[in-house]
Amino acid sequence: MSEQSQSERATIQLSAEKPLTYSPPTPEMRSAQKVSRIPVKIEPTKEMPRKPAWIRAKSQGGAEVQRLKKVLRDQGLHTVCEEANCPNLGECFAGGTATFMILGDICTRRCPFCDVAHGKPRPVDAEEPARLAETVAAMGLSYVVITSVDRDDLRDGGAGHFAAVIRALRSRCPNLTIEILTPDFRGREAIALDILAADPPDVFNHNLETVPGLYRAARPGADYIGSLNLLAAMKERCPDVPTKSGLMLGLGETDDQLREVLRDMRARNIDMLTLGQYLQPSRNHLPVDRFVTPEQFAALGHEAEAMGFTHVASGPMVRSSYHADQGGLAALAQVSA
């Protein structure tokens, strides 16, 4: 939860239904019920760990934050940032940038690090692309990130809807820079990438999330090599589109394992990187193994830069879309230079 014009980067969920009839997912769909059938069972945490002093979020009660929330409510939108308690919500809302979440708020996967609900998704809303484009225009944004839940129920994994959103945004906001943060399109990668290559974003982002040894516990249903190959295949189809990926630290990985993943990324010409601290959403989610210090994040960030990433955001509070506009625009400038 997840991932915009850096100052106001809130992740926004467009409801496929009218606000008065919208029924939000239950808490159980986000935690105990969600993780009940994953391959590596989780024992509920008896006592949530106390966050260290460097894990502190900006206040979420400012006037600009409240104004933006009202704008979104008036347009029938719902923020995943609020539901997931993203630590950057106050900073993002206060700045006026946005990451929009499309294709509903119910995921077909059961990743136990994530606070998004699992269940049977609602039907795709054909009006969503036009409504999103109008909202972006009304907000006066210059950089947006479009993300989604996993939609394994769709034949193209949701790629066609991503493309429809990109087309609507290009038509309504021709000067807008668009980054997409996609699922892995499991089993439909070639179809999905062919669709996206026909209507490419400005930046293509797909998160590896963690080291391969933790995939069975943290990303059931996903494949490490598959995710790497998705990024590489997009780069092959669209060489001028910067690629980006992110990792959570604190799930049980070692620094040497992280370095190996970074080398795997660079071997696939992945351009941009985010590294952030994993925070446990509830006692039923994966526990935090360690809190990585700001100094450790800085050191890993410097190592990543030395490996050749064009932009690295590394810190405890960094999330996938953190300072997305800064990194995305810098990467695009390098491509066009």
Image (cartoon, rainbow, N blue to C red):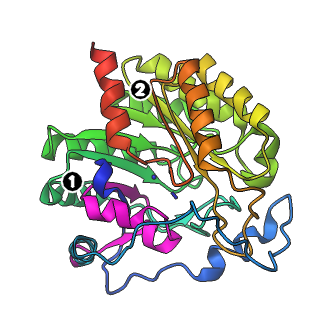
Q: Residues within 10 Å of mark 2 (few under 14, many from 20)?
A: many
- Distance from Cα at disc 1 to Cα at disc 2: 23 Å
The image quarter in which residue 20 lies: bottom left
The image quarter in which residue 232 lies: top right
The image quarter in which residue 37 lies: bottom right
**Residue 113 locus on image (x, y percent):** 67, 60
Q: Which disc number belongs to residue 133?
A: 1
Q: Residue at x 79, y 50 (%)?
A: 252
* Vertical relation: 254 (above or below) 220: above
- Three-letter code for the amino acid on which mark 1 is drawn: Ala
| Horizontal side, residue 22 vs residue 130: left or right | right
Q: Nearer the viewer, mark 1 or mark 2?
A: 2
**Residue 121 locus on image (x, y percent):** 53, 66
Q: Which disc number belongs to residue 242?
A: 2
Q: Is residue 16 magenta?
A: no
Residue stretch in magenta: 74-103
Q: Residue at x 38, y 43 (%)?
A: 324
- Three-letter code for the amino acid on which mark 2 is drawn: Pro
Q: Residue at x 23, y 61 (%)?
A: 131
| Horizontal side, residue 207 vs residue 130: left or right | right
**Residue 176 locus on image (x, y percent):** 20, 41
| Horizontal side, residue 111 vs residue 106: left or right | right
